Amino acid sequence: MARTDSLSPYLADTRRLADVIAAIQVMGTYKFYWQDFPGWAERISGDASQAAYWRRIFEDHPEFFRLDGERQGAALVWRRQYPKRFHVDEERRLSMAEVLALGEGDMARVSREPMSAGDIRSLIDTAVDLHSRALDQQKDRRWWLPLATAVAALLGAVLGAWLKSF
């Protein structure tokens, strides 16, 4: 379930931005565009037992990641838009005629094409920008702190002077 409180998911954890960037890099270049959560956890962090953690990352960042219909795995939104014409063993894009000629078993080896370095860079830049905006918004919500401190100091001084007069 995605976060519903006002805290940006980028601010929920000090390593969040780094993990989003790592997921973008791995999910953008891996030969298969979709994996289950233990598969992505193993690919990204080297520990399949971290599947629940990575699921939460994917759920908290729908701007980059989408879960499948059964909610058992995830893919990059951008990469899901590519046609399923990349043969993972031959590492090449198939023509439409080649795709239509494949049998059902052979289609298991066809995925969506890996993303270009430029496309991945664009997603990373977006993540960094969203993180920066979340930090700025957090600072903007604290505009009243210096004012409250000054008012408290003034009240303290007035109260101290008043009490001293007795």
Image (tube, rainbow, N blue to C red):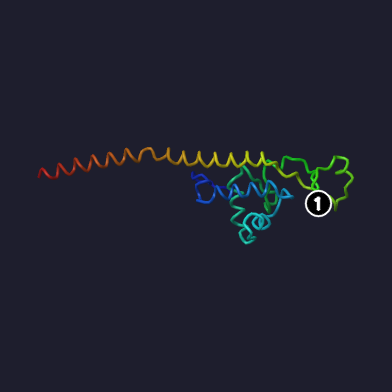
How many marks the image carries: the answer is: 1
**Residue 24 image offset from top left, x and y in percent:** 64, 46
Q: Residue at x 25, y 42 (%)?
A: 153
Q: Looking at this view, is 88 or 138 the one in front?
A: 88
Taking 132 as reference, is 53 left or right?
right
- Callout 1 amino acid: Asp
Depicted 30 relative to depicted 157: above or below? below
Q: Residue at x 50, y 49 (%)?
A: 12
Question: Dividing the image into 4 quarters, which one contains the C terminus?
Answer: top left
**Residue 1 image offset from top left, x and y in percent:** 59, 50
In this view, the residue farthest toward the right is 101
Q: Residue at x 61, y 54 (%)?
A: 54
**Residue 55 image offset from top left, x and y in percent:** 62, 53
Taking 162 as reference, is 155 left or right?
right
**Residue 145 image offset from top left, x and y in percent:** 35, 41
Residue on which the image places disc 1: 89
Q: Looking at this view, is 124 or 2 the one in front?
A: 124
Q: Residue at x 72, y 40 (%)?
A: 81
Depicted 39 relative to depicted 115: above or below? below
> Element under label 1?
loop
What is the crowding at mark 1: few (fewer than 14 residues within 10 Å), some, or many (at least 20)?
few
In this view, the residue farthest toward the front is 117
